[in-house]
Amino acid sequence: MAGDYVWIEGIPFPTTTMEDLRSMQDEFVARDEDIIIISYPKSGTNWISELIHLVHTRGDPSWVQSVVKWKRSPWLDNTFGLEDIKQQQEDPRFYTSHLPIQFFPKSIFKSKAKCVYITRNPRDILISGYYFWKAIKATKNPGSLEEYFEWFLQGNVPYGSWFDHVGGWLQMRGKENFLFMLYEELHQDIRASVEKVSQFLGTKLSPEELDSVLKNVTFQAMKDNKMSNFSLVPDIHMDHRKAHLMRKGIIGDWKNHFTVAQSEAFDKVYQEKMAGVPPGLFPWE
Ligand SMILES: Nc1ncnc2c1ncn2[C@@H]1O[C@H](COP(=O)(O)OS(=O)(=O)O)[C@@H](OP(=O)(O)O)[C@H]1O
């Protein structure tokens, strides 16, 4: 049976999230060498993580094929992930977070840690989450799409409102150690995306290394890689009969799901909530 949420300061989190986020925020010690992947759920977190890990190994797939993703980039947001991060001696440490900016460890903002924030058309995020949360035991079962659609617009979904999450993290745009990426840009030009990320990380790849990264970050390669496709998530956390991480991997699946009325309702909320965001920043507007 799917669970409910743990509510922390008005935001619903999966029940696997540590309850004392505020203590973690004060106590966590970032290192300048850290590489942090940040996203609202279902934005392409695992795609950009895989890409970053492969850039780090210069296209050698042995790490991504032998270590599960949540050990390569543990979750900052839960106690087990945090322990893994703290115990890592070697630099750089990689870790992942879906946290809204107001819960992020303060030391990260004072460090030179490199942060990559990825986002995606929120309409596609809604659909991706609608299917995925059905399988995840630490989140509430979405029920019908009509119902989930309303929850999403209200921010009554894991990690709260997409609008608030993106709005918060956009404050970091332009900072030297922050890179903003879009799922859609990875789709449109994956080679240019790999080059952009490798430049940000300070890793110059040879043409052969770049080709090997490209070969291993395709939807099919990740779907076939059990260390990346979530098939090894224990049954106590995920019902593998109900959904897979690697679902469709396309742009615009929302068009196969939204009614005209839903599409209009979404646009209205989007325009209200994103009024302060510079026009043209996102390709889906
Ligand atoms: N390589 C590649 N190419 C294209 N698309 C990809 C790729 N890797 C992951 N995905 C798609 O990303 C969606 C999952 O997002 P996240 O990784 O952020 O999910 S999670 O929040 O960590 O659960 C999910 O999107 P949907 O298919 O729309 O559900 C995945 O299919």
Image (cartoon, rainbow, N blue to C red):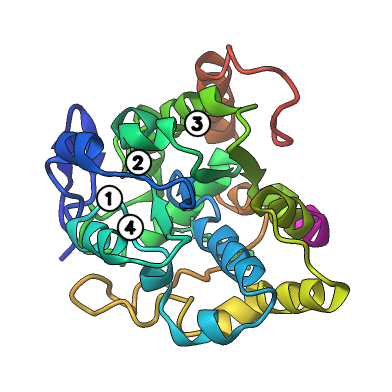
Nearer the observer, 206 or 227 = 206
Q: Are marks 1 and 2 in contact (CB under 8 Å)?
A: yes
Q: Position of residue 52 (x, y in %)?
A: 60, 62
Identify which residue is drawn at 41% across, 54% down: 96
Q: Residues within 10 Å of mark 2 (few under 14, many from 20)?
A: many
Residue 106 in the magenta stretch? The answer is: no
Does dot 3 land on a helix, a strand or a loop?
helix
Q: Are marks 1 and 4 in contact (CB under 8 Å)?
A: yes
Q: Which mark is first along the chain, 3 or 1? A: 1
Which residue in the protein does label 3 denote? 166
- The quarter of the image that holds ligand 1 is bottom right
Find the distance from the CA under tag 1 to the CA under tag 4.
Answer: 5 Å
Tell me the kind of residue under disc 1: Asp
Q: Which mark is first along the chain, 4 or 2? A: 4
Report the disc number at residue 77. 1
Q: Position of residue 166 (x, y in %)?
A: 50, 31
Read off the magenta span.
Answer: 187-192
Q: Position of residue 208 (x, y in %)?
A: 84, 79
Which residue in the protein does label 4 denote? 75
Find the distance from the CA under tag 2 to the CA under tag 3.
Answer: 11 Å
Residue 188 in the magenta stretch? The answer is: yes
Report the disc number at residue 61. none
Identify which residue is drawn at 26% across, 65% down: 87
Disc 1 vs disc 3: which is toward the camera?
1
Report the disc number at residue 99. 2
Tell me the kind of residue under disc 4: Trp
Find the distance from the CA under tag 3 to the CA under tag 4.
Answer: 19 Å
Q: Are marks 2 and 4 in contact (CB under 8 Å)?
A: no
